Image (spheres, rainbow, N blue to C red):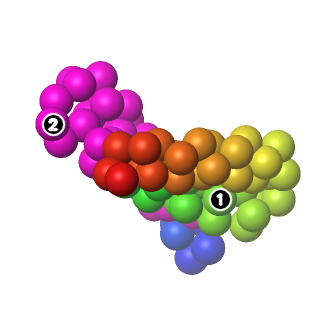
Amino acid sequence: MMFERLAVVGWLGSFFGLAGSFLLALNTSFSGYGFVAFLASNCAWLYHGTKTRSWPLVVMQFGFTVTCVIGLRNWFF
């Protein structure tokens, strides 16, 4: 059961990460929503990393979350 949940979370993290990258690459008026997708991806990978005790992944995703919040602030405010 836990393995299935982690697999789903991993796929969701991958999907939202790719969606965020695609949205930012479009460089349109709605590209800022890529940061929202990145934030969803970061949350998924933080969950995955803590459950699997993959601490390097957790540290990296924490850093990405910080940069994502900065991006959200810059884009929307």
Residue at 82% across / 43% down in the picture?
A: 56
Image-based side of 74 in relation to 32, left or right: right
Residue ID at (82%, 59%):
53
On residue 29, the disc is 2
Residue contact between numbered discs 2 and 1, judged by CB atoms under 8 Å? no
> What kind of element bears circle 2?
loop
Residue 51 in the image: above or below residue 33: below
- Span highlighted in magenta in the image: 6-34
Q: Position of residue 52 (x, y in %)?
A: 76, 59
Q: Which residue is mark 1?
A: 46
The reply to whether the magenta stretch includes residue 29 is yes
Q: Main secondary structure of the magenta part?
A: helix
Q: Is residue 1 shown left or right of residue 28?
A: right
Q: Residue at x 73, y 66 (%)?
A: 51
Residue 74 visible (yes or no): yes
Question: Which of pointers 2 and 1 indicates the residue nearer the eye?
Answer: 2
Residue 57 occupies quadrant: top right
- Image position, residue 55 (x, y; %): 84, 51
Residue kind at label 2, given as amino acid type? Ser
